Amino acid sequence: MAIEYNGYLLHGNDGDTIDEIINNGLLKARKYIWISSAKANDFIVVNERTKEGELLSKKIFRLAQRGVNFKFILAPHEKTKTYKNAKTFYQKLRDIDNIEFEFCYDMHMKIIIVDSLTIPYFKTFCEYNSALEESN
């Protein structure tokens, strides 16, 4: 079964910070974002204009409120991970309607795919679609 996906791979250029990649890439999504990683940690992202920091989970929550759909593919330990005095990234976002979580035991890749064509941090990701077709 082929899965049609017309997204774009989010990537940084030499010297880019994670804040730049998130602010100028991830946060400009309009329809959907797919994220795969073995680990999902919440961290502070600094707004380039205001220089104020905000947790990534709050930024994702606001995108979800705007109608952006998320799919996270994570290692299973992310579902059961606990902290003493704080919620995990998964616990903060798991109950939001348009955020979906899948868990894969052999998750080692780190990929972010976003829908928008207008973002300078994207390149065409045709290889991903081809790989999905071949594996199914």
Image (spheres, grey):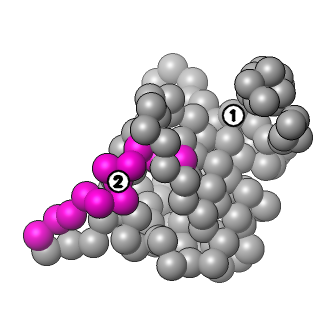
Residue placed farthest to the left in the image?
84
* Residue type, numbered disc 1: Leu
Give left or right: position of 24 versus 133.
left
Quarter placement of the C terminus: top right
Q: Magenta stretch: residue 56 in it? A: no
The one of 46 and 77 positioned closer to us in this rendering: 77
Tag shown at residue 9: 1
| Quadrant of res 112 | top right
Give left or right: position of 23 versus 116.
left
The magenta stretch is: 73-84
Q: Magenta stretch: residue 83 in it? A: yes
Number of numbered markers: 2
**Contact flag, marks 2 and 1 (Cβ < 8 Å):** no
Quarter placement of the N terminus: top right
User: Which residue position is annotated with label 2?
Assistant: 78
Tag shown at residue 72: none
| Quadrant of res 88 | bottom left
Give how far across and how far down residue 94 sits, in percent.
48, 71
| Residue 36 can be seen in this image | yes
| Quadrant of res 99 | bottom right
The one of 92 and 14 positioned closer to us in this rendering: 92
**SS at mark 1 in the image:** strand
Residue in view at x 54 percent, y 47 percent: 73
Marks 2 and 1, Cα distance to the nearest angstrom? 23 Å
Q: Is residue 116 above or below residue 10?
A: below
Residue in view at x 21 percent, y 63 percent: 82
Q: Is residue 125 above or below residue 63?
A: above
Residue in view at x 36 percent, y 59 percent: 79
Give left or right: position of 36 versus 128.
left
